[in-house]
Image (tube, rainbow, N blue to C red):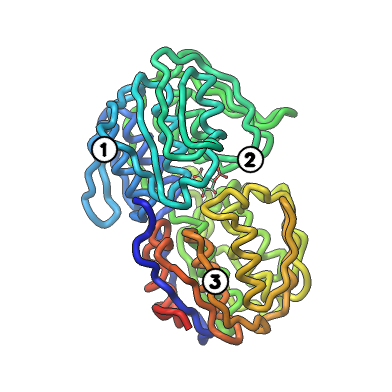
Amino acid sequence: MSGHGTPIPMTSHACGPLSGEANVPGDKSISHRSLILGAMAVGETKISGLLEGEDVLDTAKAMRAFGAEVIDHGEGKWSVFGVGVGGFAEPDNVIDCGNSGTGVRLIMGAMATTGISATFTGDGSLNKRPMARITDPISLFGAQSVGRSGGRLPMTIVGAPNPVPVRYVVPMPSAQVKSAVLLAGLNAPGHTVVIEKEATRDHTERMLAGFGADISTQDTDEGRVITLVGQPELAPQTIVVPRDPSSAAFPVCAAIITPGSDVLVPNIGLNPTRAGLFTTLREMGADLTYENERTEGGEPVADLRARFSPNLHGIEVDPTRAASMIDEYPVLSVVAANAQGDTVMRGVKELRVKESDRIEAMASGLRANGVDVEDGDDWWIVKGMGQGNVPGGATCQSHLDHRIAMSFLILGMASLSPVSVDDGGPIATSFPIFEPLMKMLGADIKRGAV
Ligand code: S3P
C-alpha cells in the first residue's frame, strides 16, 4: 500500500446529545500480537474479536508471506497455523506494512533471529518514521539491515542465522521497541534481558507467558527488567481480543464535550499500562464512571459511562503517565480546548514520531479552529476556551494519521462552526466503523469539506 487512495474529506457539525452504546472494535496492539505470536507457535491459534482494520490486515498478510497459514472465518474469528519459533520462510516479495509502525517493527524483531532476509515498506507516513530504534537492538543479535538514509523504510533486514542473546536498555519509552527485542529473543539461545526505564504497555509480556514462554518481570531501581528464556516451543492459544481503550477514547471524549450526552462504552480493558487517559479525564472534572468492573483473561475490564461534563478544567497532566496514554493525547487536546484554563502536557517527545508529528498536526489544526496552543520539543499547552466556545470553521490536515482525523471530527461536534478534515481515509487503519458508530450515537458527520 503506498497511501490510502483517493482522499475522503469529512465534516463534523455541532450535534445534539450523543446517546446509546458504543461497541468499539478489538484492541489493535493485541490483534497484531495475536497474529504474530500465533505464527510463531506450533499448531492452530484461534482468535476472536480481531480488529479487522487495515493495519492488522497488513500484519495478517505478512504472516502468510512468512509461511503461516492465516484463515479469516468472518466476524472477527481467525485461525493462525504457526510455523514455530525460528520457522519463518523467506518471503517471495516485499512486505508492505501499510500505515503500521507496530506491524513493521514487531515483524522485523520476530524475523531478525532467523536465517532469512526480508524487505519492508509502507505508506507515505510509515516510510518517514524512524527504524533505527529497531535496527540498533536487532544488530546486537547479529542481524543486518540496509534502508534509506536516516534509517527509513524501505529497508531490508538480513536475519542472524546464529543469533546471540542480548541485554538491552530501551532508550525511549516504546512498547514497540521492547516487543521487537523480546520477539527477536525468542529465537536466540539463553536469556534475553530487556530493561525499560518507564513502564509501557505490557501485552507482549502477558501474551508470551500465555503462549508458554518462560518470561519474568522485576521492578528494580534500574526500571522494569524483563527476562526471556529463548527457543521455547510456543503452544497455540485461544485468544479473545478485548476492545480497544484507544478507540473507546473517541466516543468517551465526544460524549464528555457534547451537551446532554450519555454514552456507554462496554467491555473496555483498563490495563494500567493503557488507561491513563481515563484517569486524566476524571482529574479534569469529566463525568466518567466505570461500571461492572471485572477481570477477564487476567486483565481488568469495565463498561465506561461517559456523560456531558460542563465544568471541565485544564490540568498539568502527570508526565509519568505519558506512556499509558500516548495515543490519546490528540483527542485529549480536543477535550482540553473545551475546558477552562490551560492543559499542560509534558514528557511527550514520542508524539513527534507517530503516524504524524502529532503535536504539530494537532497544534496547527486547533489554531486554525481558533484555539491557542503553545508547543516545544517535548511539551505542549492547550489554552482551553470553555465548553462550546471553540470557533471551529477550518479544514484540518490529517497527515495520513487516523487519530488526527478522528480527533478533529470530535472537535467539530462541540464547536460553533463545523470542522473538516482533508482525508478521513486513514481512520480505516484502526477504527473502520468510526463513522457509522459515531452517527448512530447522534454525531452529524458528512462526507465532503465545508
Ligand atoms: C504500540 C505502542 C505504541 C503506540 C502504538 C501501539 C504497540 O508505540 O503508540 O499505537 O502496540 O506496541 P510506541 O512503542 O512507539 O510508543
Instruction: State the mark number for residue 131.
Output: none
Q: Is mark 1 within 8 Å of ligand 1?
A: no
Whether residue 245 is visible: yes
Instruction: State the mark number for residue 64.
Output: 1
Distance from disc 2 to disc 1, alpha carbons, whole Å, reads: 30 Å
Question: What residue do we see at 75% from left, 64% from top?
Answer: 374
Question: Of label 3 and label 1, which has the lower sequence position?
Answer: 1
Identified by mark 3, the residue type is: Cys
Expressed as whole percent of the image width and height from the top left, the position of residue 26 reads 40, 54
Question: Of label 3 and label 2, which has the lower sequence position?
Answer: 2
Distance from disc 3 to disc 2, alpha carbons, whole Å, reads: 29 Å
Identified by mark 2, the residue type is: Pro
Front tag of 3 and 1 = 3
- Quadrant of the image occupied by residue 70: top left
Q: What element carries label 1?
A: helix
Expressed as whole percent of the image width and height from the top left, the position of residue 141 reads 50, 19
Q: What element carries label 2?
A: loop
Q: Name the residue under label 3.
A: 396
User: Is residue 102 toward the left or the right of residue 364 in the image?
Assistant: left
Expressed as whole percent of the image width and height from the top left, the position of residue 81 reads 25, 34
Instruction: State the mark number for residue 173.
Output: 2
Question: What residue do we see at 39% from left, 37% from top?
Answer: 120
